[in-house]
Image (cartoon, helix red, strand yellow):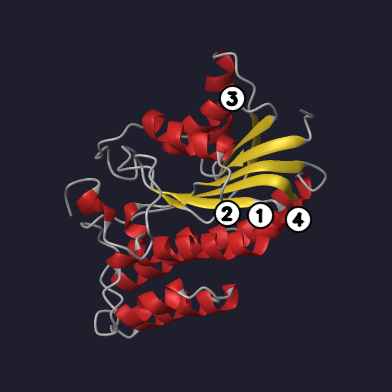
C-alpha cells in the first residue's frame, strides 16, 4: 500500500488513542498519524512507539481549533484516508467544580461539534473503501435520554446534519435557561454529546455508503484513563483491540457496536442491563 494511504487517530498521545495507534502501526499497511493537541506530548508518544520498532507519523491537531483543523486538512489533502478514528474528547466527572453551563458547553463543543467539524473537513480525503470510526460510549445509547419526543427526533431516519446541530444547540440553550430537566434532556452533558456523536455516525453513513465508505460508532468499554482518574474495568490496550478490528475489517456501516463486539439497537433496551448485567 502506498505511503499516501493513511490512518488518522485523534487525541492519541496517551490512553486509548495511543493504544489504537500502536495497534494500527502493527496491522495497517499504510502510514499511521498520531495526532494530539499538545505537540510536545505527541512527539514524545511517537518516540515511545519508534523505540518499539514502529513507524508512526506525527501532526499537531486540536479538533476544537478551526485553524489547527484547516492546517491538518491542507497537509493531508493529497493523501488518501483509509481509516479515520475520532477519539478526542473530554469528560467532567461528577465532582467537577466548574459551573453547569460551562461543563455543558465545553462538553458539547468538544465531543460533538469539534468532531463533526473536523470530520467534515477531512471527508474529501476519504475515498471508496474508507472507514470512519467514532469512539462513543454507553452514554450514547438513546435510552439515556428521558424524553420520548427527543429520542424520536434523534432517531429519525431523515434527520439532517443541520437539524442535528440545531438539536444540540437547543440542549445548550435549555441548560442556559436551567430547563434541561423539565424538557427531558436529563442531567448529563456527556450523554447528550455522545448521543449526538451516534446520530452523526448514522447520518454520515447514510450519506457516504453509496461511495463505499463505512461509518460506525463503538462503545469501547469503561476504559481506564486519566480522564476517569484511573477508574474503569478495561485497559486502553484491551479496548483498542476492538476499535482496531472494526477499523480494519468492518464490512457494514451504520452500526453501534458494544465493547463485547455485539451490534446493539440504538433505540432498544439499555445494553448495560442485558449485556453488562448492571445499570
Disc 1 and disc 2 in contact, CB within 8 angstroms: yes
Disc 2 and disc 3 in contact, CB within 8 angstroms: no
Alpha carbon separation for disc pair 3 and 1: 27 Å
| Residue at which label 2 appears | 63
Residue 110 visible in the snapshot: yes
| Residue at which label 1 appears | 69
Alpha carbon separation for disc pair 4 and 3: 25 Å
Residue drawn at x 25%, y 58% as measured from the top left? 96
Q: Disc number at residue 247?
A: none
Labels 4 and 2: the sequence-earlier one: 2
Residue drawn at x 54%, y 31% as measured from the top left? 21
| Residue at which label 3 appears | 27
Residue drawn at x 70%, y 51% as measured from the top left? 212
SS label for mark 2: loop
Q: Look at discs 3 and 1 and give the one toward the viewer.
A: 3
Alpha carbon separation for disc pair 4 and 2: 17 Å
Amino acid at each position: 500500500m502506498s505511503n499516501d494511504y493513511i490512518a488518522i487517530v485523534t487525541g492519541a498521545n496517551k490512553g486509548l488513542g495511543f493504544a489504537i495507534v500502536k495497534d494500527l502501526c502493527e496491522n495497517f499497511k499504510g502510514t499511521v498519524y498520531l495526532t494530539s493537541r499538545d505537540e510536545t506530548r505527541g512527539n514524545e508518544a511517537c518516540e515511545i512507539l519508534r523505540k518499539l520498532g514502529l513507524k508512526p507519523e506525527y501532526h499537531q491537531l486540536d479538533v476544537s481549533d478551526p485553524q489547527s483543523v484547516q492546517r491538518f486538512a491542507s497537509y493531508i489533502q493529497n493523501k488518501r484516508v483509509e481509516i479515520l478514528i475520532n477519539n478526542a474528547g473530554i469528560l467532567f466527572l461528577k465532582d467537577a467544580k466548574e459551573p453547569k453551563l460551562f461543563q455543558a458547553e465545553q462538553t458539547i463543543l468538544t465531543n460533538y461539534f469539534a468532531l463533526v467539524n473536523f470530520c467534515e473537513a477531512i471527508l474529501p480525503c476519504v475515498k471508496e473503501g474508507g472507514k470512519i470510526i467514532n469512539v462513543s460510549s454507553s452514554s450514547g445509547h438513546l435510552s439515556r435520554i428521558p424524553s420520548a419526543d427527543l429520542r424520536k427526533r434523534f432517531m429519525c431516519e431523515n434527520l439532517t446534519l443541520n437539524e442535528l446541530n440545531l438539536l444540540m444547540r437547543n440542549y445548550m440553550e435549555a441548560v442556559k435557561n436551567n430547563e434541561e430537566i423539565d424538557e427531558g434532556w436529563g442531567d448529563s452533558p456527556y450523554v447528550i454529546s455522545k448521543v449526538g456523536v451516534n446520530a452523526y455516525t448514522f447520518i454520515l453513513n447514510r450519506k457516504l455508503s453509496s461511495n463505499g465508505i463505512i461509518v460506525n460508532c463503538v462503545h469501547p468499554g469503561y476504559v481506564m484513563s486519566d480522564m476517569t482518574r484511573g477508574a474503569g474495568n478495561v485497559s486502553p490496550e484491551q479496548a483498542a483491540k476492538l476499535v482496531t478490528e472494526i477499523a480494519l475489517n468492518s464490512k457494514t456501516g451504520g452500526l453501534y457496536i458494544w465493547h463485547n463486539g455485539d451490534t446493539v439497537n440504538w433505540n432498544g433496551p439499555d445494553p448495560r442491563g442485558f449485556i453488562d448485567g448492571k445499570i
